[in-house]
Image (cartoon, rainbow, N blue to C red):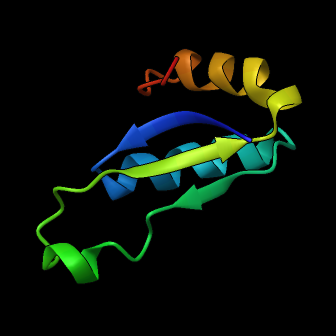
């Protein structure tokens, strides 16, 4: 699994997940429940991971939709 995106904005994460799922790319979201530790102030980013074989295509989809991409 490779990290392809990191963001503190939950709407970006949800949008990216929906886009990738629509392309048939399985997405795994990390750090979903970290708000318990941070007090729900949104300072810890969430991360999206995909299979290594899907990473290139996933990054293309995110870039085409002006979303941040982790290299």
- Left or right of 17? Residue 25 is right
- Left or right of 54? Residue 30 is left
Q: Residue at x 76, y 49 (%)?
A: 21
- Left or right of 60? Residue 62 is left
Residue 3 point in image, percent of width and height: 59, 36
The answer to which of 10 and 5 lies nearer the viewer is 5
The answer to which of 14 and 71 lies nearer the viewer is 71
Which of the image's four quarters has the N terminus?
A: top right
Residue 22 point in image, percent of width and height: 78, 45
When the figure is inspected, residue 45 is found, relative to residue 54, above or below; the finding is below
Q: Residue at x 87, y 44 (%)?
A: 24
Residue 31 point in image, percent of width and height: 44, 64
Count all numbered tags in the image, as a single digit. Answer: 0
Residue 33 point in image, percent of width and height: 40, 77
The quadrant where residue 58 appears: top right
When the figure is inspected, residue 17 is found, relative to residue 62, above or below; the finding is below
The quadrant where residue 62 appears: top right
Q: Residue at x 64, y 51 (%)?
A: 18
Q: Residue at x 17, y 76 (%)?
A: 40
- Left or right of 52? Residue 17 is left
């Amino acid at each position: 699994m490779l990290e392809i995106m990191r963001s503190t904005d939950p709407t970006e994460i949800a949008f990216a997940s929906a886009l990738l799922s629509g392309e048939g790319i399985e997405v795994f979201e990390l750090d979903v429940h970290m708000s318990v530790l941070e007090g729900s102030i949104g300072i810890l980013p969430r991360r999206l991971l995909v299979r290594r074989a899907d990473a290139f295509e996933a990054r293309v989809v995110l870039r085409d939709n002006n979303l941040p991409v982790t290299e």
